[in-house]
Image: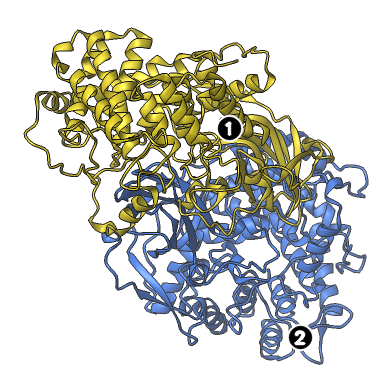
Chain colours: A yellow, B blue
Amino acid sequence: MNRRQVLQSVASVPLATVVSRPAQGAMPEPAAALAVMRTRRQAWLNQAQALIPTLSQTEQTPLGLVRFTADPSLALRLRIDPDAGPPLEDRLLEKGDSFILDFGGHRTGHLSFDLIGEGRGVDAPVRLRLTFGEVPTDVGEPLYPYKGQLATGWLPDEVINIDYLPQSVHLPRRYAFRFVKVEVIDTSSTFAVRFRNVRATALTSSGTSPAPLRSGDDLLDRIDAVGLATLRDCMQTVFEDGPRRDQRLWLGDLRLQALAAYATFGGHELVKRCLYLFAAFPRDDGLLGACVYEKPTPRYGGIHILDYAALFNAALHDYVEASRDIATGIDLWPVALRQVELMRQWINPEGLFVDPKTLWLFIDWNEQLDRTASIQGVLIYAFEHTVHLAHLLGREHEVSGLDKLIARMRAAAREHLFDPKSGMFVSGRQRQVSWASQAWLIIAGVPTSTRQAAEAIRRAITLETAIRPTTPYLYHHVVEGLLGANLRQQALALLKEYWGGMVTAGADTFWEVYDPEHPLSSPYGDIHINSYCHAWSCTPTYFLRKVGLTQ
Amino acid sequence: MNRRQVLQSVASVPLATVVSRPAQGAMPEPAAALAVMRTRRQAWLNQAQALIPTLSQTEQTPLGLVRFTADPSLALRLRIDPDAGPPLEDRLLEKGDSFILDFGGHRTGHLSFDLIGEGRGVDAPVRLRLTFGEVPTDVGEPLYPYKGQLATGWLPDEVINIDYLPQSVHLPRRYAFRFVKVEVIDTSSTFAVRFRNVRATALTSSGTSPAPLRSGDDLLDRIDAVGLATLRDCMQTVFEDGPRRDQRLWLGDLRLQALAAYATFGGHELVKRCLYLFAAFPRDDGLLGACVYEKPTPRYGGIHILDYAALFNAALHDYVEASRDIATGIDLWPVALRQVELMRQWINPEGLFVDPKTLWLFIDWNEQLDRTASIQGVLIYAFEHTVHLAHLLGREHEVSGLDKLIARMRAAAREHLFDPKSGMFVSGRQRQVSWASQAWLIIAGVPTSTRQAAEAIRRAITLETAIRPTTPYLYHHVVEGLLGANLRQQALALLKEYWGGMVTAGADTFWEVYDPEHPLSSPYGDIHINSYCHAWSCTPTYFLRKVGLTQ
């Protein structure tokens, strides 16, 4: 299913009849791994909950006041100018007055301030509207009328009434922001207000930041810093996908965040917690969820993405490799095994993935993308990780046939998904050429040679009609594909062009969606609902620090 | 100053230069009483703070769901009908859905509810708008565009975002309400919400309610009950004027609330606290404030009303009479004495009040009212209370000349304010006839006979051109005036007509303003900012229970 179908299928279910309960799979009798999963669910949840990290709280003061000026030459069309007026503490604000604070850089956290009333009679509640901005467009443009499809409650504004002045105001909700716009809706005719001691409290579980990168290339150093900030602000009591919107633990995002974290903050314990959360909330047949809700208490996410479930095995393997925590690997091994059991049923005897049409295949948000070739790559990659994990854990015997399956799948991909005429991988009946198919089949080791891999991906990237990525998540895999094809310079160039494009557009953290051609686009119908600090965007720091992709 | 002038004078002061500091009076050297006031301020404040009552908290569930139907035959033009839909707990609410709860009767307090998300994915914050209604128009009509002059922050609506479901939601602010309208601004496309366990927590310091009145007249019994509810909901940690709006301790209101409380709930300790609060925050020259702010910490109110300051002496006398708390009377005696010293300067040698034009004269909101005759009455009344208080406290020697002054003032009033031709009291150069002048001069014992009093007030009330009251506060004094003129039947009739009019219009508590001819009028430009539970309206219960005005 693509995004629109997902939304439609959800919308078409009468709400009264929808229950948050795993759908019944059409699976045969539970295998041994599934039996373990069912037995261990509560223990795994307890384990996850025992790992809830303490968030560090850092108090931060704003750098100053700013205003935004229309500038069509900029990607977001708004220039940040200093506000030439007096400092905030020297301003007495009346009905209709407003200001915009710039805290410099992005944070996930709280806002507090002292509000003082001054005048003949401080005799009424003050009504304020606060708007939290990750980027200038959030606060420099009106949020209403809201045109998006996502919940209005995600819009980053708040109307509050403050009863008694002076008062130290602490907003109870958490926000993701660099800018805060404050509008005085009203005081009364007999007093005005003054803001003092405005401060943010930044929250993260990331711990100490690594030393800044010194690559010799300022743009790369900045890309690394922005990636680090993205990861830091998504590291809360789980790896969130975006601290402004969604705030949810997604398996696909987790895998990339974990890779970036191992190379920077560490974060092994948080990864462990998240792996356990996924293990605790599978579907009845053991298929892992694509996401898990954490709050108010952890619960089943109700959404399944085939490629995400498969990638759990890669994430678990990465974790055991990074942490050497064999015990956790063994504890969660039945989960990985069960994913393989489930995935195998969708491989035909020849070794080709056949879309069961009952599951969401993600890969990217691009609705035009034919995903079957990419999924073939994902499954091979996931199975291979499973084999490596089995070796680490001494469980080779439990995956004895998997190597052969992987070989068969690679052979089938070479046979059916490679177009010798064009030299590129193709997907589906329409034999669609996409960046995704090249990238994932290279990552899966399908090409017969590095040269074949390099030609396939180079050609697709330069082919006008090839389906391109729309998300940083897929761009990550394209960079991986280029590296797999030994196209290091091209990988670096893409990283600089794509993530560097966001930096040039003013990003303090990397965005959920970024289309260089249309930086004001949104998959949700309104850019003000986009998330501008999004986990799956953070991986440049992994490439720069772990892979050493700095030149 | 009338209300408009007050607002204008306030508005014309540049906010930046206004400081919350007592204005300098043009008084001579401080007298002994003033010296004591200055010395004792902090001690009196401490005494007031030691008397902060504990509020009782009563949990209440709504009676049901209602809707409002336009009905031009009703005073507020909205009929309350039961909502024929399913019970609230059986409703699953989506974007755009709404409901109106009827808690039955008025309360001051909090609202709590459990909010449950149901659907395929409970994946976003819920945005709700809640509107608290004292009367149907509050929630049955749009609040916006708001046309009033008072602070928008007083409007009884709130937009909240609730991050995680299920959640037990407790709104932190206090509201005054019978009805609560809940509008679901948005959930998301994958879930809806259900409300459970909606409950109010009613707050009051009034203690146990007296037994219901059994007068034999249903309307009177209902008027008494509504008056009691009004008083109960205004009795918080001070006697508030209105629990929805203003929420402030006003001296004029306090005096009437105290009279009603002595006859019903008691409340002596709360009166004592309030008297001490006024004593602690006078102007530099000792003139008492018209109001005191209680929260976040008690402070000077910055507003002075000549008649209110004078009536402190009546309120203190009433308190000592009701409580027999001589010690407090003696402690606060210098305050009463100082008020007399200040008031005397505005009496000319003949014994007539001369408006100093530097102070607000209240009496009523009616802007047409000439207040000088009424103030003459207020001062005589206040001085007489002071003499009685002096006797109670053994301080007669300190007010030795006051009896003579009172006599002179009565004589001057008879000479200059009584029009023998019309048989009514007149006020000002225009020799204006008003209900207020008759009432206050009768209360002050100015008429030479009960017959003269009766004729004066009867004629004024039937005179088309006489200036009428606009507030329940002045209606109270008109009833007092009728009783003073021995017009018991007319007093009872007025009470039934005026307060009974509100009851017939559907009042659960008595209103801040009620014009029988124009029940949809507001002194503030918008009826949605009116207070429908207002302390100065509660006195029918005093007349019915203390005065015995039931037949």
Q: Give the mark toward the camera: 1 or 2.
A: 1
Q: Quadrant of the C terminus of chain A?
A: top right
Question: Dot 2 corresponds to which residue?
Answer: B424
Residue A218, image x, y percentages: 69, 19
* Disc 2 packing (10 Å; few <14; some 14–19; many ≥20): many
- The residue nearer to you, when weighing B428 against A60, is A60
Q: Is residue B159 above or below residue B496?
A: above
What chain is tagged by disc 1?
A: A
Residue located 27% across and 67% down the image = B86
Is residue A276 among the parts visible in the rendering?
no
Amino acid type, mark 2: Met
Q: Are marks 1 and 2 on the same chain?
A: no
Give how far across and how far down residue A104 sits, in percent. Answer: 68, 30
B344 to the left or right of B438: right
Q: CA distance from mark 1 to mark 2?
A: 90 Å
Give the label on residue A498, or none. Answer: 1
Check disc 2 and report its element: helix, strand or loop. Answer: strand
* Left or right: A390 in relation to A374: left
Compared to B27, does A336 lie above or below? above
Q: Nearer the viewer, residue A166 or B3?
A: A166
Question: Label 1: how many residues lie within 10 Å, few (<14), some (14-19) or many (20+)?
Answer: some
Chain letter belonging to callout 2: B
The residue lying toward the viewer, choosing from A425 and B530, is: A425
Instruction: Give the image location of residue B256, x and y in percent.
Output: 60, 62
Mark 1 element type: helix
* Above or below: residue B375 compared with residue A534: below
Q: Which mark is residue B109?
A: none
Q: Where is residue B441 drawn, in percent x and y?
A: 74, 74
